[in-house]
Amino acid sequence: MNCSVSEDGSLCNEFISLRFREKLKNDSIKLWLPPYYSVENKGQSEEEKRAFQELVEKFAVALNLDISVCHDILCQFQQNALKHLQERSEYKETGVATIRVKVSGAQNDVCQKTINVSTKLDVPVSDVQKMIADKLGLSAERLKLIAGGQVMKSDQQLMMYGIQNGCQLMAIILGACAGEKLRAEEVQLRSVQQMRADIGLLANSTNQVDPYLQITDQAGNSLYLPDEERRSLVTAMTLHEKGRAAMKRNDYALALIFLLEADKEFSSCRSQLLERVDNFALLNMDIAWCYLFLENLALLPDAEQRLKQCEAKFKYSYGPNLERIVELKGSAGNEATLLLRLHLLQGIVLFHQNKTDAALILLNEAKAELTSLKQIDSSLPVLLQMGFTPAEGRLGLRATKGHVEEAIAHIEKRRQELKAARERDGLERESRKMGKCVDGQQWVSEVVVSQLVGMGFQRELAVEAARNSNNVIHEAITLINEQPHVLTQQLMRTLLHKITDLGFLSTMAKLALRKNNFNVERAIEELTVCNGYIEGEVSDEDIPSTSTGKTLKDAGKILKRESEAFSRIREDINETGVDDYLDSTLEEEERFLLRYLSILQS
């Protein structure tokens, strides 16, 4: 076996080490005990040296390796075992544990490596962060620690995460320390905290003029959920999208932080919706994908469990042989991309568990899936020349098994479906802005309102007429013609609530609504610009005092803060309608697949 060349030398060395560990375990060989070592003598006698050399020669023959390679590896294993014994003894005597930390995500300034820290287990995580940061010459604020698939909180004790002597943690380094990148680094460090604050602000928004953060199904139709449930789902899905965006930028360190935070939010969701969609399964696979890029083997147990959950969810959602997704969509070509990545990741996990036979089966399955998908993608240039985007082209071809004409029809149909969904969504959002009818059951219909406006009626009165007639158009027309003053009074009461909830005085809100012909958006905008006071017929007692003016000014800032928060969030949100979670160029999958297969087949 030749493992001395190529960029996969470290991976090959890992594979050799796995074979050594398995043989040592199967043969019940303990290198720290006689006949290979004497702890009492703290060294090897001549007899023990001969026994050790005989063991080296035996391993060289059994594993078909050079004697010098076997000698170096067994010596390293022996030294590690003795070091662990010493650490265990020290822990029993002093309570000071040795924790191994795999450093990942460092860019340019620090190479990926493993370091040891010695500490009591009842100390806060922040103490360990500082120890690691000091060893790396970095600021502790740049570090995030991960244990068992959780982002560790700085104020929690180590033992709260089940940390024991000899455990391994993952340290994520965010940003770069170069002077010109300092500002970007600070943004990264604040990004997760800022995102949570933004989502919390919008999820709790009382602004009914333009609701934020709608949840849609795969067809693009809005889903309206109870507030608490919606808040959790919005937070989880937004953090997931942020993680995906970081993955696309190849910033897998920051991506993993976002994804694990999303995992925490999804885990707290009680919605039955999660049982019917594959969001959580996709998140688990994305987390495992980040583990792979960050080369952290300490998280293999977490990756294995996540992939099991992902596989179970896929089978439930798509069917054991993708028959459900075929029935739903007519094709499973795009979902085949997800199964390729799943089988690849599962094979890699098995590789690092030294289950080579099972790993080879899954990796060969992934290879066959990759070959099939690449053949389908071979017609992509044809679609690109016709003006379709790469993502549209790949998804169209995979949905139609590579048939170009069918792919074109599929893309056009998908575009029409998304357009129709956006139009329906727009109507639904407008209806919910207008509130419910007097029956308390149905929303005011945007279709009915549009019909009334088309007849020449003022929109605001049309809305109130539709509300009072429960969307019965002929009754709405009668109300407008015969009782316009009643509708005007009711309209004023309805719109006043939307404005006074923001902190503006009722009298000022009335003036603003009359001045702007009952257009609530323009009324709020004018009140905000005028600091809550508009000239008009109003008594002295209605003029806002200095303190009230400050309140109104702050109220006006609420909408601005919400708008800014929404802008920050939507920077990385996919709004194209393309199922980008299904779109992959397959380049990275192929690279990893070839790396692992080359070692297993050598």
Image (tube, rainbow, N blue to C red):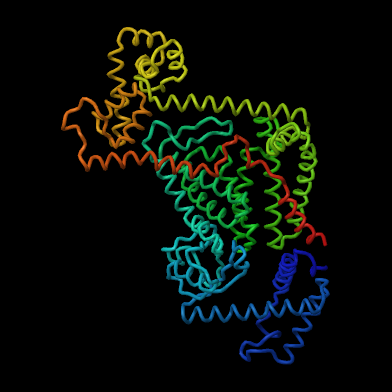
Report whether 308 appears left or right of 508: right
Q: Position of residue 389 (x, y in %)?
A: 69, 36
Depth check: give the residue in front, 446 or 456: 456
Q: Residue at x 57, y 71 (%)?
A: 100
**Where does the C terminus fall, quadrant-wise?**
bottom right
**Is 105 located above or below residue 274 in the figure?**
below
**Is 186 located above or below residue 547 in the figure?**
below
Residue 403 falls in which quadrant of the image?
top right
How many marks on residues? 0
Q: Position of residue 22 (x, y in %)?
A: 71, 69
Residue 504 falls in which quadrant of the image?
top left
Q: Residue at x 36, y 36 (%)?
A: 206
Depth check: give the residue in front, 592 or 181: 181
Report whether 208 appears left or right of 535: right
Q: Position of residue 3 (x, y in %)?
A: 79, 68
Q: Position of residue 481 (x, y in %)?
A: 34, 8
Q: Residue at x 76, y 46 (%)?
A: 370
**Is 464 located above or below residue 163 in the figure?**
above
**Where does the N terminus fall, quadrant-wise?**
bottom right
Q: Residue at x 33, y 30 (%)?
A: 498
Depth check: give the residue in front, 90 or 378: 378
Report whether 239 appears left or right of 78: left
